[in-house]
Image (cartoon, rainbow, N blue to C red):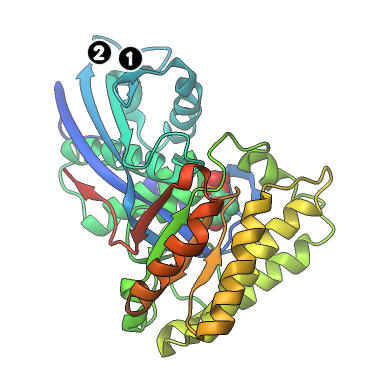
Amino acid sequence: MIENDFIPSSYKYEKEQGRVQWKAPSNIALVKYWGKKQNQLPANASVSFTLDECRTVTSVTFTKLDKANKEFSFDLLFEGKSREDFKPKIVTFFERIEKYIPFIRNYHFSINTSNTFPHSSGIASSASGMAALALCLMDIEKQMASEMDPDFFYKKASFLARLGSGSACRSIKGNLVQWGDHNEIIGSTNLYGIPYPYPVDEVFKSFQDTILLVHKGQKSVSSTVGHDLMHGHPFAKNRFEQAYDNLIRLRSIFTEGNLDDFVEVVESEALTLHAMMMTSIPYFILMKPNTLNIIEKIWEFRRATKNHLCFTLDAGANVHLLYPNNEKNEVNKFIKEELIAYCENEQYICDRIGFGAKKM
Ligand code: PMV
């Protein structure tokens, strides 16, 4: 598909008003997207686990305006409170997607959104938030179209979500989602995320993700700035090649259920992401001392038990612990006894691989 395929020719029905509601999950990348081109196109392909527990629930009430507005017409409640400071992000999102859903000028939207994970937990809500909003808008568009193929619906929702926040395009479907052109991954595209198109061993379908909340404050450098610093980065070319190769490696790892190799790829990806931050100009560090303390503990634990607990990081200090379901008891004991001491207020979130967004 190409971008123009997402521009509707006309709408069959005019809706005066209505309400839609969707919940969309967060996701955690295994091969990281870091660096982007114009229009939210990724510099390298990535793959992620869709999560289950960490979600955004968004409802949109829409009312037809007497005439199309110059400004986008919407109000926004976040966790029951009006948040003017969130509005510019939505305006930017609307500007980017207007071409693809032209009806947005003709309506007033009341957006009501909340997260299942604690606010200011340092967990990015942009992926689940943009995915849930994109799905609501697609649901409205679907009501105005004469018919819409479900496959097209989800592809376009992912396409729109990407224009809100790149990684949000991986928060529509489960349980493993691939995003970005890759010559050796069939159906892959920069435009939207696709369900992982190759066989995946059962062990990965019940994987656990415990998120250790190491630092709950605002990040010192935003993802947008971080992505930008990959332009002219001395290691960018090698990094993009490495991501490409890791996706090839993961293909057989997923099929064979090879957990040792999985651990190696995933941890290397996490550390490389942060290495890119540390070697940007200007350089920056988002990990905290306790991020490193946790990593040390994980390595000790793995040496001692020979199990398959590994970590990954997103653009922040929190640590995602990934492990197979059948190692859950031993790992949970270890988390409680050894790791929660490194979490802010001993807080952590127990999540697992999930199966995608749902209409409510
Ligand atoms: O979607 P963004 O622009 O917030 O970027 C996400 C970047 C990482 O979380 C660090 C990696 C990824 O692939 O999700």
Does residue 147 appear anywhere in the picture? yes
- Element under disc 2: loop
Depth check: give the residue in front, 72 or 83: 83
Depth check: give the residue in front, 279 or 187: 279
In the figure, 11 relative to 235: above or below? above
Q: Residue 60, located in which quarter of the rendered image?
A: top left
Depth check: give the residue in front, 23 or 189: 23
Instruction: Compute the Cα span from label 2 to label 1.
Output: 6 Å
Tell me, for residue 162, which label it has, or none: none
| Residue at horizontal 62 percent and vertical 55 percent from the top | 291
Left or right: 185 in relation to 282 = left
User: What amino acid is found at the position of numbered circle 2 in the picture?
Assistant: Leu
Q: Position of residue 251 (x, y in %)?
A: 49, 82
Q: Position of residue 130 (x, y in %)?
A: 40, 40
Residue labelled with disc 1: 68
- Some atom of ligand 1 lies within 8 Å of the CB belonging to the residue at label 2: no
Q: Position of residue 72 (x, y in %)?
A: 40, 18
In the figure, 95 relative to 70: above or below? below
Label 1 CA crowd tier, 10 Å (few <14, some 14–19, many 20+) = some
Q: Quadrant of the C terminus?
A: top left
Depth check: give the residue in front, 98 or 315: 315
Report the number of numbered marks. 2
User: What amino acid is found at the position of numbered circle 1 in the picture?
Assistant: Ala
| Residue at horizontal 32 percent and vertical 59 percent from the top | 173
| Residue at horizontal 34 percent and vertical 53 percent from the top | 172
Tell whether label 1 touches label 2 (CB within 8 Å): yes
Left or right: 287 in relation to 263 = right
Residue labelled with disc 2: 65
Label 2 CA crowd tier, 10 Å (few <14, some 14–19, many 20+) = some
